Image: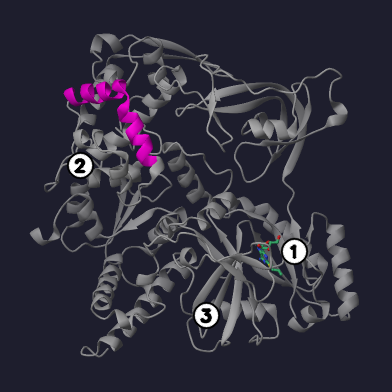
Amino acid sequence: MNADNPLQQIIGLTRLINEHNHRYYVLSAPVISDQEFDTLLRQLENLEKLYPEFIQPDSPSQRVGSDLTKQFGQVVHKYPMLSLANTYTEEELRDFDQRVRKATGNEVEYVCELKFDGVAIGLTYRNGVLVRASTRGDGTRGDDVTANMRTIRSIPLMIRGRQCPAEFEVRGEVYLTRHQFQKLNAQRIDEGEEPFANPRNAAAGSLKLLDPAEMARRGLHCFLYYLLSDSLPYATHYQNLEVMKSWGFRVSDYRARCRSMDEVTDFIGEVDKGRSEFPFDIDGIVVKVNSIEQQQLLGFTAKNPRWAIAYKFSAEQAATRLLSIDFQVGRTGAVTPVANLQPVLLAGTTVKRASLHNADIIAQLDVRIGDTVIIEKGGEIIPKIISVDLRQRPAHSDPLEFIITCPECGTPLTRNAGEAIFYCPNSDVCPPQIKGKLEHFISRKAMNIESLGEGKISLLYDKGLIRNAADLYELKYEDLFGLEKVLQTEDKTKVLRFREKTADNILKAVEASKAVPFHRVLFALGIRYIGETVAKKITKAIPDIDLLMSTDRDALASIPDIGERIATSVVEYFANPEHRMLVGRLRRHGLIMKEEVKSVHSGGILAGTSFVVSGVFTSYSREGIKKAIEENGGKVVSAVSQHTDYLLAGEKMGPEKRKKATQLGVQIIGEEEFNRMIGVNPTLF
Ligand code: IVH
């Protein structure tokens, strides 16, 4: 690299970093540490600041745009974005094979691929550079989502190698792993947002985000499965997939070339058996004619190619009777209807309850008590009612009416304009809302009062010992010792009794929670739309509760990433005198109400956070870094699992650990980032 020539340096660094990105995100085989990677990136960013005119179009610094895209432009597809004809039966697959053989002569080879259950995307490259990404839209034109797609790290901004058509398009599917989906939903529930119904909806919602930085945080992935160009490099689809892979695209290796329908159905059977093992949802298998010449011969109908078909796995269904409906009230006051069903076996488990989502869905299904309903288990965890068997409807049944008052406290329900969900507005009095708020308050990411679980909170509430979070800090040993409650589960009776140790542990954990930093205290209050990340952003801008309580809506809304809706929610929360009183009491009990300027090793900052440590570190010995984690309240565990928060990666870390962490979506951080977390200035060493 020529040290005197900034252009050469920028080009060299861009290429080098892109190579490492490819190794990390596509091949899952990195060769440098995160820290080394970050150093390279910083060098490049510094040079780019000095010489912005030399920034390369595929620069890794261009991935996370922080500017807001106000609205999406429209893109006219050069090649219409068609969908596939579907089938659920082997018979129809054989019909398809007959049609293909008739039109092309007898020799046909098929390529079978996974049918990813995500959102279709088209990426256009000109001279090897990504110039446009668009959604399917109506097939003729779609939304321009280039800024968002650039944040997906497995999508090359510039292809590898030189041998590619001057212009080409790749089509693929953007998706979220099941693990990322659950994480995202848990976060949304914490923030009082409606969770997504399944990973596909979550991916679709993410693509339409106006803030690419937020999209980047969601950790979407993309598989590519189709190459289009006026001059395709190879005569078969399979070879074109291989060349796409060599250009740096993520192409699934889970595919097969088949010479007969028997081979195709074997592949389908194999995938169907193992599909729960994939970390993402698939909903079938796509069968494509391999020869491009034969594809052209077959051509397209108005909607689908004649050279491909999707075999869809059927979601298992069962018919059963709807016995009753419960209306459950959550922490935010949202009322969710849940169907109680005559128990029935579905996909290996006995189902007794099904989700009915909201009032609109009940009305749309016109489902009534006593009806025979068809339930289905798709990607979702709770089965859903998909239809009613009207032939079996009892003679005298009434349409179901959604309740108008809260089933727990009798308060009239409200509904925001344009929203499907009803809320109980009596948030400070309605029992499940209070219990839900207390459960949120003690949860791991909030005050982390581990020894108080859901059951114990409920007991303390039922005994009249706690009504709000401040009451927790007034609990005495005498209140707790000897408390008991009989828990009746379906098959057994359990007695929950507070013995000496339980009482002691609760009091200790309550005391320890007083060291929790301000941003987590703010999150713990359970203000609607204030999740963990938002709480951090607010306390960074307004590091003191008194200041926060007197900040107006406009000032709040001017904080980066804080919109009107969040600002209004904060202002409304603190306008309520009861909430101000609660804050006052919590403060008197010693909770931290200011974001502290962290000194070296301030206590408890990592409370509730678990780390796996791997590799060699610059400024710590292996034991030293573990000690630093523990001194800050964190936990060191040996193996990466779904419950691990961070993989702390040193140099020469084990590739297996990184692979596992990447698969499970566990965040990987380097030493420098860790130091920032615990507030250590590395220059002190
Ligand atoms: S090929 C012209 N291959 O399924 C044919 N599609 O229901 C282009 N999909 O629109 C599509 N996995 O969004 C193809 N391996 C795969 C796929 C796949 C998922 C999606 C795609 C398509 C839809 C059709």
**Residue occupying image coordinates x 74% and y 81%:** 292
Quadrant, the C terminus: bottom left
Which quarter of the frame holds ligand 1?
A: bottom right
**Residue occupying image coordinates x 26% and y 24%:** 580
Quadrant, the N terminus: bottom left
Q: Residue 20 location, x and y as percent?
A: 38, 74
Q: Nearer the viewer, residue 505 or 397?
A: 397
Amino acid carrying label 3: it is Trp
Residue 12 circle label: none
Residue 574 colored magenta? yes
Q: Is residue 78 above or below residue 495?
A: below
Q: Specify whether 565 is left or right of 280.
A: left
Which residue has dot 2 on it?
543
**Distance between the Cα atoms at labels 3 and 2?**
48 Å
Nearer the N terminus, badge 3 or badge 2? 3
Q: Nearer the viewer, residue 231 or 113?
A: 231
SS assignment at label 3: loop
**Distance between the Cα atoms at labels 1 and 3?**
26 Å
Asked if residue 252 shows in the view, the reply is no
Tag 1: Cα neighbours inside 10 Å, few (<14), some, or many (≥20)? some
**Residue occupying image coordinates x 41% and y 11%:** 462
Please tell me in which quadrant of the rendered image residue 77 appears.
bottom right
Nearer the N terminus, badge 1 or badge 3? 1
Nearer the N terminus, badge 2 or badge 1? 1
**Rendering colour mode:** one colour
Q: Is residue 103 above or below residue 549?
A: below
Q: Is mark 1 within 8 Å of ligand 1?
A: yes
Amino acid carrying label 2: it is Pro
Q: Which residues are magenta?
A: 566-589
Amino acid carrying label 1: it is Leu
Which residue has dot 1 on it?
84
Residue 247 circle label: 3
